[in-house]
Amino acid sequence: MTALSEKNRQKTAHFDGVYPAVKKNGERYFRASLTYRRKHISLGSYASAKEAHAAYLEGRAILSDPAVTVSRYTGSSPLPFEKWVCLLNFRDNDIYFGSPIYVSAKMFYYYLSPTIILKFDPDDLFYYSSHRIMRRGGHYFVADYGMQVSIVTRYGIMPYAREGHDYRFRNGDSTDFRRENLEIFNIYRGVRREQKKGQYVYTVRIHVKGNYLVGRYGDQLEAAVAYNKAIDILKKNGIRKNFVPNYIEGLSPSRYAEIYASLSVSPKLYQCRPDTISRSNR
């Protein structure tokens, strides 16, 4: 970054919390920052010294006035909304996060916007303080190892799961991701709980250029094993696909083998080969 001349520095010397800088292309801009409780906090970059100074003054006001809350934020604020939340949390809880998190006694809030507020258990605080949540449609993601990962997978919910079908929010609030509020119906790949004639059954399908019906079972664990059995049959028939089998915790190898041998699956699976999978079987 090119150094500014002394003349340029003097032009903004009377603006507290404002620091002029120059981009590599020679364009000038202004940084705003402040120090609070011995922590230096960057407030962002601005096109003019007056804008940067306004951000500095607003940051000071947030930190010094307990009456300032999230509800006071407006779209004309010099500071971004996320920075408001970060400063409010630092003021009230004496801990600074780079993410828009506000901590309360029994949960914490992640503010995606003034109106979209996610709730989480305290145990998730470390994770979300270092993973920024994004939203696309009604789905929430974090960037993890260069990939977009749905946050529902953190709670044992499959990324393709549907609310109301595979899981539900007990209190009806689809922004409340506290574990006690999540009821998961389908925890295994290829398995969906369905209601047939007033009773729940577990329908198993496997995707091979379409959804092939494996069968319907009265027990979720049996359904999970049936999905694994379908994988074995398809691989033996030469279907080359990176299927991920269900991991079934707490089941001994002998009991697994017993259930596996006793399960019936659709005869069409045995006929499914690379040259016969142009259509799906539903």
Image (tube, rainbow, N blue to C red):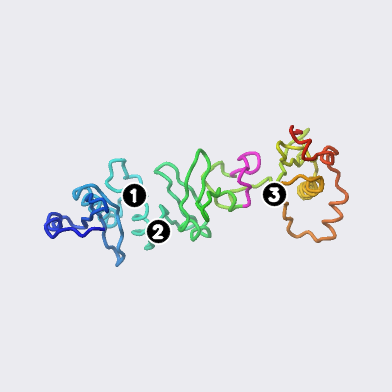
Q: CA distance from mark 1 to mark 2?
A: 17 Å
Residue stretch in magenta: 156-169
Quadrant location, the N terminus: bottom left
Give the mark nearest the N terminus, 1 or 2.
1
Query: Is there a contact, CB below 8 Å, between mark 1 and mark 2?
Result: no
163 on left or right of 129 = right
28 on left or right of 273 = left
Q: Residue at x 82, y 40 (%)?
A: 269
Placement of 77 over or under 31, stated as above or below: above
Q: Secondary structure at mark 2?
A: loop
Q: Main secondary structure of the magenta part?
A: loop
Q: CA distance from mark 1 to mark 3?
A: 50 Å
Q: Is residue 47 visible?
A: yes
Q: Pick the residue in front: 171 or 60.
A: 60
Give the mark nearest the N terminus, 2 or 3.
2
Q: Which mark is residue 242?
A: 3
x and y percentages locating residue 262 in the rendered image = 88, 49
Q: Pick the residue in front: 140 or 38.
A: 140
Under mark 2, the amino acid is Phe
- Circle 2 sits on which residue? 97
x and y percentages locating residue 61 in the rendered image = 25, 53
Q: Is residue 219 visible?
A: no
- Circle 1 sits on which residue? 69
Q: Secondary structure at mark 3?
A: loop
Under mark 1, the amino acid is Thr
